[in-house]
Amino acid sequence: MRAEAMELDLSGLPEELIFLLSLLGGTSPDQHLIRELGAALDWDRFMKLAMHHRVYPLAYIKLKEAYAASVPPGVMESLHRQYQSNTVKMLHLSREMSRVYERLDEAGVRTLLLKGPVLAFQLYGDLAHRTSKDLDILVSPDEVERAEDVLLQLGYELMDYRALGNWKKKSHHLSYEHKEHRTQVEVHWRLNPHFSKSYSFEKLWERKRAVALANQTFHCLGNEDQLHYLTDHGARHGWFRLRWLMDIERLLPQISGTRLRDVLKQHGGKHHVGQALILSSQLLSAEIPGELEELTRDAKARRLADQALFYVSRIVQLNPVPEKSVAWHYYRYLFSLMSTRQKIAYLLNKTLPSSRDALLLPLPKPLYFLYYPLRPLLWFWRRFRQQSA
């Protein structure tokens, strides 16, 4: 049954978003309502929302199956083109994922795949039903350099500036791009950038899940670790893309409440999970397993769900840098996600110089110690430049 979660105030949502949510969730509109809405909907805005939220493959499938005759032909044609383009891209990503994973395995680098084609297959049963921008892999912190060697041999280039020796502590992943076909790969050695109480790679590896795809076996996070990671990721990004909530809705039937409670007891994050459950229930009519309903009654989870609705209801970009109109709102929201311990760790980490400081103000190596007293000035300078841009 559905959880009796906080009733979010959805009155401010545009009709086009409400219609999109009804398509994606468990309460698809009937033909009569489609015909009524057809004349009133701003279909251009509907397309912008479907593209922004990265759910256009599912929107196309739902409309094609039952409502194509009631939708303007131009909309269906545009959705069809986007669907085909995404299919080609996902097939390419899948092939490249296979190549990268195989070479890492040959080099003895244990690899857990995050999101991407494997998640599309695991949750949707079809690569074409989900979009992915790049490939995300998780490796042990001790194996990052070996993973990088493999990627460089495959034709990838490091896209991040790495000057100071504390880059593993300051960040949680590095980005690479292939010199020819421009495929992007992110190598993670930690799941969360904000120094939360993270799992060790060894524990994640013990609980890994094997997924068979195209005659090859890949390893990804176990279901409960996957939910913990996806809710943490979605919360940090304000759930500004509905695609992430769709992932939660699809993953829920595979979750063991007992194992999830153990994960949350050890590593925290119940507020993020509760927030995701509330949003999934209210926006997508997701069925919340009875053993997880208590998480939707958490007061902080309810506040966070209400805050995230601010981003869900807008076409807004928060990553990699939040757009100027919502930047301070987002930073306050991001800080509210953290526990007291996480806030202290986050603030302490901000006092440490980073490679971005060295990029902004290059200094010879003997003078690197100056980055410590200059850190506050350089941080504000960089923020000012970002906001001006």
Image (cartoon, grey):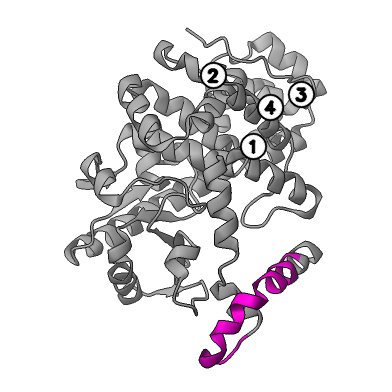
Residue 296's tag is 2
Q: Which secondary structure type mostly characterizes the magenta part of the structure?
A: helix
Q: Amino acid at mark 2?
A: Thr
Q: Mark 1 and mark 3 in contact (Cβ < 8 Å)?
A: no
Q: Is residue 76 magenta?
A: no
Residue 15's tag is 3
Sequence order check, earlier mark of 2 and 3: 3
Q: Secondary structure at mark 4?
A: helix
Residue 306's tag is 4
Identity of the residue drawn at 46% across and 55% down: 134
Q: Residues within 10 Å of mark 2 (few under 14, many from 20)?
A: many
* Distance CA(mark 2)–CA(mark 3): 26 Å
Q: Mark 3 and mark 2 in contact (Cβ < 8 Å)?
A: no
Task: Tell which of 18 and 339 is nearer to you.
Answer: 339
Sequence order check, earlier mark of 1 and 2: 1
* Total marks in image: 4
Quarter assignment of residue 80? top right
* Distance CA(mark 3)–CA(mark 1): 13 Å
Residue 73's tag is none
Identity of the residue drawn at 50% across and 72% down: 159
Q: Mark 2 and mark 1 in contact (Cβ < 8 Å)?
A: no
* Distance CA(mark 1)–CA(mark 2): 27 Å
Identity of the residue drawn at 78% across and 27% down: 14
Q: Secondary structure at mark 1?
A: helix
What stretch of residues is rendered in magenta?
A: 362-383
Sequence order check, earlier mark of 3 and 1: 3
Does residue 247 appear to the left or right of 263 in the view shown?
right
- The residue that disc 1 covers is 50
Q: Can residue 169 be seen from the camera position used here?
A: yes
Q: Amino acid at mark 1?
A: Ala
* Distance CA(mark 4)–CA(mark 3): 19 Å
